[in-house]
Amino acid sequence: MFTGCAPVTAPIRIGDKWTAKIIRCLQDGPRRFSELKVPLTGITPKVLTESLRAMERDGLVTRTAHPGIPPKVVYELAPLGHSLVGPLDTMCAWSRANLPQVLSARESYESR
Amino acid sequence: MFTGCAPVTAPIRIGDKWTAKIIRCLQDGPRRFSELKVPLTGITPKVLTESLRAMERDGLVTRTAHPGIPPKVVYELAPLGHSLVGPLDTMCAWSRANLPQVLSARESYESR
DNA sequence: CACCTCAGTATCGTTGCAGAAACCGAGGGG
DNA sequence: CCCCTCGGTTTCTGCAACGATACTGAGGTG
């Protein structure tokens, strides 16, 4: 992704289905595993675990397990993850502003 | 992608492997199919065709076929595509600035 | 004893992206 | 006669992501 720049899709995985959503769920503070699962409608625990592990590996989030029964695990944005919130907002703003035009372009393409 | 916002990955496909690179190849002017294939090292004609068709469908690029032998097809950024250059630069800047930290985070994760 | 919570695992199947390689048609060159 | 160009298309194949469902451990509660 982004010629001449560092690749984003493959190594950093921002462009996948869940990473950006997870960052936005965490941007207002730390959350527990089950508190992430609810707003991320449709995600399965397996995929959420995989995504969080990959993000932890890349230094985007921190994972803190509080021992005890029932278990409690808290995920929080690391500084690196926080630094992504701005760029993500930029893309999000573009999306909000231009989605209608994309959809109308697609509609007129379909009916050619 | 981007909770609460319009989805970007699935319907608009910005987060895929080639869309962003193609936009960056086109941002300085129109190019022909074969002029795109060279700088996008590793792309196969099939994937390039698919990507360009999807982008045309979404109104990001325009395709102009000049009849004749040999055929000549010119791709150009539509206004909608141009409006993506800015946000893309933002992500690109983040990538350049933060890739080293991601890699070092990954390295220290590997050696835990 | 049975059941609840939480944070995952395990196993399986599906889907779609991506790539390699071959092929196309029509004209021009050697 | 064969090969080259250009902008693709077609076929085959692998792989990674995604997803559904079931299950775990360990203690507290009824």
Image: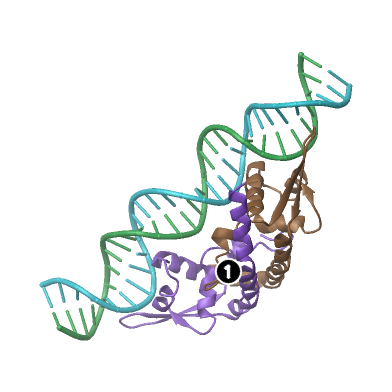
Chain colours: A brown, B purple, C green, D cyan
Q: Secondary structure at mark 1?
A: helix
User: Does the rendering let one see residue A111?
Assistant: no
Q: Is D27 situated left or right of B54 in this image?
A: right
Report which quarter residue A44 is drawn in. Answer: top right
Residue B76: x and y, percent? 51, 81
Q: Chain of mark 1?
A: A
Residue at image point 58% right, 77% down: B81
Residue at image point 59% right, 48% down: B111
Residue type at numbered disc 1: Arg
Vertical arrangement, residue B49 with respect to residue A57, above or below: below
User: Does the rendering let one see residue B65?
Assistant: yes
Q: Is B56 situated left or right of A75 in this image?
A: left
Residue A109: x and y, percent? 54, 71
Residue A34: x and y, percent? 76, 43
Q: Is D5 situated left or right of C17 in this image?
A: left
Q: Is A8 situated left or right of D28 in this image?
A: left
Q: Which residue is mark 1?
A: A106
Q: Quadrant of the N terminus of chain A?
A: bottom right
